[in-house]
């Protein structure tokens, strides 16, 4: 579309102002230009996108659905550009006022989200933060620059466009209620294999068959999985009020006096811990903002002390 290729990008800023104010005079005041300039800009926009872009009303204009969608698209285009400018030219963490978007594996969000937020706010006191769990659309959003930083467990498939670095390793244990009738005495496979199991769902990392089920099968047992959930809170409740167990980290027992961490049964070394990785776009590795995010995440995880098992 030739008109679109030749379109002055400043017209999209004008379109956004008219959509927000629904009045060409108010849009002119907002942009600090003359009303005549706004009218000329609206005429050019209508030439590019059609006469029905705006409908004139008695006290202003009514934007069409197309106009509102174009205004949203202009935001999505300008915000990453503004963030690049803020994060690269004369970057000052104390003065940065942009939005930082972090996407985390839901397990990591529940375990570390609060600590990460406070660590980021300490170095970027005037920024706003968006912390969400990683979803199917998150990879596309990250590649488009809408997500600044991600945290995932090692093994999550990601393209080479994303620079990944190890942040920490988390030791695993068995989680169950305090004074568990079996685990208080032993964690041997022959004694625990028939206990009910709860597990955290981690989207994108596990296939159709639960890894815990594969582990039990390799040992010659049938895994009795009674609860699979995204919610650590739901899982903890099940553990507190039953004899169920979970293969997890001792962080899950923090602030949960009714839960304890018990030794794992005999397992290969690679199954006794999980690695947490951070990542951001390779194209942003030289940007001071992203270097600061990287260092802040590393400093936070270096400071975290994992609770010990029984």
Image (cartoon, grey):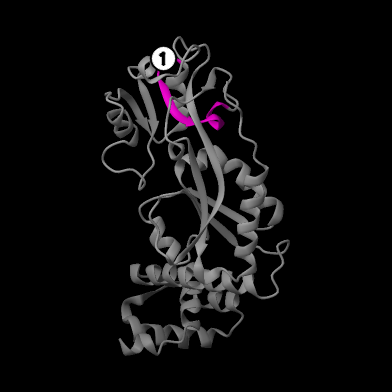
Q: Name the secondary structure under disc 1.
A: loop
Q: Quadrant of residue 73?
A: bottom left
Q: x, y (%) of residue 106?
A: 45, 42
- Which one is nearer the viewer's eye here, 135 or 20? 135
- 131 on left or right of 207: right
Check disc 1: other Cα within 10 Å, few if <14, some if 14-19, many if 20+. some
Magenta segment includes 246 = yes
Q: Residue at x 52, y 87 (%)?
A: 37
Give the quadrant of the N terminus: bottom left
Give the quadrant of the C terminus: top right
Q: x, y (%) of residue 178?
A: 53, 14
Q: Is residue 213 above or below residue 100?
A: above
The magenta stretch is: 241-253
Q: Residue at x 65, y 61 (%)?
A: 292
Q: Quadrant of residue 301?
A: top right
Q: Quadrant of residue 63?
A: bottom left
- 143 on left or right of 35: left
Residue under label 1, please give it.
Answer: 243
Q: Residue at x 36, y 23 (%)?
A: 197
Magenta segment includes 262 = no
Total marks placed: 1
Q: Residue at x 38, y 26 (%)?
A: 198
Q: x, y (%) of residue 125?
A: 70, 55
Q: Is residue 280 above or below residue 54?
A: above
């Amino acid at each position: 579309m030739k008109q679109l290729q030749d379109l002055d990008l400043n017209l999209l800023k004008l379109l956004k102002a008219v959509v927000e104010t629904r009045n060409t005079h108010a849009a002119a005041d907002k942009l600090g230009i003359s009303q005549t300039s706004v009218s000329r800009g609206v005429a050019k926009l209508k030439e590019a996108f059609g006469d029905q872009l705006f409908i004139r009303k008695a006290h202003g204009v009514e934007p069409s659905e197309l106009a509102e969608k174009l205004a949203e698209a202009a935001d999505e285009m300008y915000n990453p550009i503004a963030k690049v400018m803020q994060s690269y030219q004369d970057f000052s963490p104390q003065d940065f006022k942009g939005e930082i978007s972090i996407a985390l594996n839901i397990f990591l969000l529940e375990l570390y989200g609060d600590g990460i937020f406070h660590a980021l706010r300490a170095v970027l006191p005037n920024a706003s933060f968006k912390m969400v769990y990683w979803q199917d659309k998150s990879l596309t959003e990250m590649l488009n620059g809408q997500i600044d930083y991600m945290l995932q467990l090692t093994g999550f498939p990601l393209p080479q466009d994303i620079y990944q670095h190890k942040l920490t390793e988390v030791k695993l244990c068995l989680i169950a209620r305090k004074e568990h009738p079996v685990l208080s005495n032993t964690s041997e496979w022959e004694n625990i294999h028939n206990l009910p199991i709860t597990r955290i769902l981690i989207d994108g990392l596990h296939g159709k068959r639960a890894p815990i089920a594969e582990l039990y099968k390799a040992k010659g047992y049938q895994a009795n999985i009674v609860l699979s959930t995204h919610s650590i809170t739901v899982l903890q409740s099940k553990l507190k009020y039953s004899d169920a167990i979970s293969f997890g980290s001792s962080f899950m027992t923090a602030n949960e006096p009714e839960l304890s961490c018990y030794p794992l049964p005999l397992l290969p070394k690679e199954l006794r811990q999980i690695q947490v990785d951070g990542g951001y776009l390779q194209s942003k590795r030289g940007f001071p903002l992203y270097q600061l995010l990287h260092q802040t995440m590393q400093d936070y995880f270096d400071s975290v002390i994992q609770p010990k098992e029984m």
